[in-house]
Amino acid sequence: MKQIVKCGPSDTPHDIDIPALRERYRLERDKRLRPEGGDQYVEASAGFADYADVDPHTPPVERAAVSEEIDVAIVGGGFSGLMAGARLSQNGVTDFRILESGGDFGGVWYWNRYPGIQCDNESYCYFPLVEELGYVPKARFSDGTEIQAHCKRIGEHFGLYANAMFGTRVTSMAWDERIKRWRIATSNGDDIRARFVIMCVGSTNKPKLPGIPGIKDFKGHSFHSARWDYDYTGGSWENPVLDRLGDKRIAVIGTGASAIQIVPFVAQYAKELIVFQRTPSSVDRRGNVPTDPEWAAGLQPGWQKERQRNFHQWSFEFVPPGPVSDDAICDFWTEINRNMAARMEGQKPQEFVLEQFLAAREEEDYRVMERLRRRVDSIVEDKATAEALKPYYRMGCKRPCSNDNFLETFNLPNVKLVDVSDSQGVERITETGVVANGIEHAVDCIIYASGFEVTTRLDRRLGIEPYTGRDGLSLYDHWGEGLKTFHGMTSHGFPNHFYTGFTQAGVGANITAMYDQQVGHIAWIIKQTLDRGAVVMEPTQEAQDDWVRTIHETAIDNTEFLLECTPGYWNGEGGGAGPDRAKKLRFIFGEPYGPGFYAFDQLLQDWRDRGDMAGLRLEPASADATDGVVQPA
Ligand code: NDP
C-alpha cells in the first residue's frame, strides 16, 4: 500500500429525492432542538467533579509551592503547548514554564485513554514536528498510545520536561501593572510572575455531562470517556483486554467520535452493552493501513507541509475550478470535493458560477450522506436498528467518523441500541439504571461518552477566576459580546497575553498545523519584544478594531447552514430552540479569517517581514525613557 494513492470520485447514489431528504433533515433537527441549548449540560465541577477533576493515570505528586519570575508561562501541555515550547526554544527564549494539569504532556492525548482510541485524521498530517524529529507515524490512523509517545518525544527533544509543572491547574491570572507581569496562581499554591502568557488550552479539554435528572442517584459505577477507569474494566491503555466486564451490564451514553471507537471494545467483553443514541454519527469505512516503509524512506524534505496543504485544500478550502494538485489523502474527509472536482473537470474558470457550484455541492453532500446511510443497511442486520443508525443531516453538521467495527457491533447478541432522539436524550438515571422512552434499563456501569465543553461559556470552560488584564478587565467580559482580537492572538487591555485556538485566526483542516502557525507567530513576537528591550507588548485599540472589522467583512456567512444542522457542539447546540436561534449559534471554529488558512499564513508572514510590529505598542523597561514606543532592533 502506498500512502500517496491516486483516487477518483466515489460511487454515490443518484436515485435520491433531495426535497424529501431536505424535509427529513429538517424534521430530524427539529425533534432534537432543546430550548436550553448548551445549558442542557452540567458542568463537571462541584458535585460532578469526580468525572473530570480526577487523574486516573498519574498519582498526585506532592511538591512545594513555587514563587518565581519567568519570561513566559505556557498554560497547557498538549500539542499546542508543546509546540509553543519548541518554537520559543528555537527562538532562543528559554526562561519559560509549561503549566499542565495532567501528569505528563499530551493534553487530550494524555487524558483520553479509552480502548480503541485513535486519531481520526491522517497521522502523516496530524503529528506535528515529524520532519524536525525524523519520525514517521506507524500507520495511517495512529493509536492514542503512539500519539502520546510523540508528545513525550517532542518534550524530550526540546528539553521541555525541565520546564514543565505537571499536576498543576491554573486557578487565576491577573495582569499586574506595577510589575508589568502576569500573576498566576495555581492549584498547587504557586505564585508565578510571568512576563508573557501563552494560552494553549485546546478546545476539548473539559469533559461535560448531560444534565440528565438523577445522575447522582446512580448507585453503580460510572465515569466519563476521557477518564477511562481500567481498574473497573480490566485491561490497560496499551492492552485493552477489558476482562473484568464479563459479568457486567454497561450503558454507553453518546455516539460521537469517542463512543464510535469505544463501543466495539466494550461490546467484545461486556455481558451486555446498551448504547443510548440521540443523534447518529456518520460512520464510513476506516481502511487503516500500516505505513509503507518504502514510501516513508522516500519522503523528501518539506513533505509534511505539502501534504497538510493538500489535505487542507481538498477537505476544507476547495477553490474551484482553480488548479490544485491531486488529492493525496483520498479519504472521507476529501470525498465531496474530490467528487466535485470530477464534476467540474474541463470547466474553464470563466464558466464558473458560484451559485451553481454551491447547488451542485449540496447535491453531492446529499449523495455522500445517502451512500453512508446505505452503508448502514449493508452492515446492520436488524432493520429497525439500521434505520436508527442512519444520519440525516449534512456533512459538516457533525464530525464525520470512520470505523470498521462500530456498525458491525450492533449485530452482536449482547448489544442493543436505544434510540433516544424522540425524547431529546436519556430521560432519567435511577439508582439502578437508565430510563429511556419510558423503559428502565438496569445496568452496572454507565460510561458517559458525552463530549466536552467546546462552545459553552469561556469562564465555564477554563475555570480560571479571575482572569483579568489591565484595570481589572475580565477576558470573559471583553469577549462577552464577541471576540475582540488582533490577528486572533492578542487583545487590547491584555498586555503580553496570547491566546491560541479557534478565535479570529485562520482555521486549518489540521488542528496541529493551525497551532503551529499561531505559536510560531507568537514566539516570534515574544523574541522581538525581548530583543527590542521592551517589557510590554499590547495591540492598540485601533489595530484590534481594524482586525475585528476585517474578520466581519471577510466572514463567510454560514448562519443558514448552521441553523439547518441538527444540534450539537459544532453549532452551539443549534442556538437552542427559540426564535433568536441565529443569535445564539456558536460556530466551533470561532470567527475565522474568511480568505482562509493559507491566506492568513501569508498575512502573518508579510507582517513579520515588514518588521515594524505594526499594531502592537511596545513599552520599554523604563517607563520614563520614551513615549512608550520602542524602536525596531
Ligand atoms: P461528542 O460531543 O461528539 O459526543 C457526545 C455524545 O453524547 C453525542 O452523541 C451526544 O448526542 C450525546 N449526548 C449528549 N447528551 C445526551 C443525552 N442527554 N442523552 C443521550 N445522548 C446524549 O463527544 P466525543 O467525545 O464523542 O467527541 C468530541 C470530540 O473529540 C470529537 O468530535 C473530536 O473533535 C474529538 N475526538 C477526536 C478523536 C480523534 O480521532 N482525533 C477521537 C475522539 C474524539 P448529540 O449528538 O445528539 O448531541
Image (tube, rainbow, N blue to C red):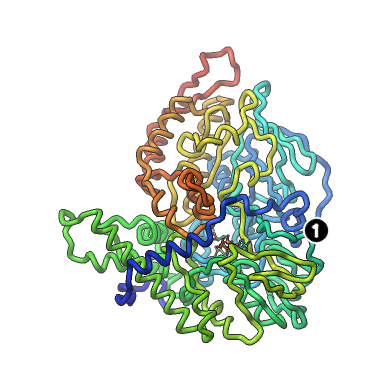
Q: Quick one: 409 or 563, which is closer to the camera?
A: 563
Q: Position of residue 324 (x, y in %)?
A: 28, 59
- Label 1 lies in ligand 1 vicinity (Cβ under 8 Å): no
Quadrant hosting ligand 1: bottom right
Instruction: Specify the quadrant of the image occupied by residue 342.
Output: bottom left
Horizontally, is 478 left or right of 190 in the view?
left
Does residue 528 appear in this view?
A: yes
Residue bearing mark 1: 59
Q: Is residue 277 above or below residue 356?
A: below
Residue 512 at least partly seen: no
Image point (45%, 70%), residue name? 296
Label 1 crowd (10 A; few <14 / some 14-19 / many >=20) = few
Q: Is residue 468 above or below residue 281?
A: above
Residue 370 at what x, y percent from top left?
A: 39, 73
Residue sticking out furthest to the front: 438
Asked where in the image residue 444 lies, by quadrant, the reply is bottom right
Residue ID at (37%, 40%): 603
Q: Please, what secondary structure does the residue beneath circle 1 have?
A: loop
Q: Is residue 352 left or right of residue 191?
A: left
Quadrant of the snapshot with the N terminus? bottom left
* Disc 1 residue type (three-letter): Pro
> Against 67, is 288 above or below?
below
Return the residue found at the far top.
624
From what the image shows, is residue 91 above or below residue 298? above
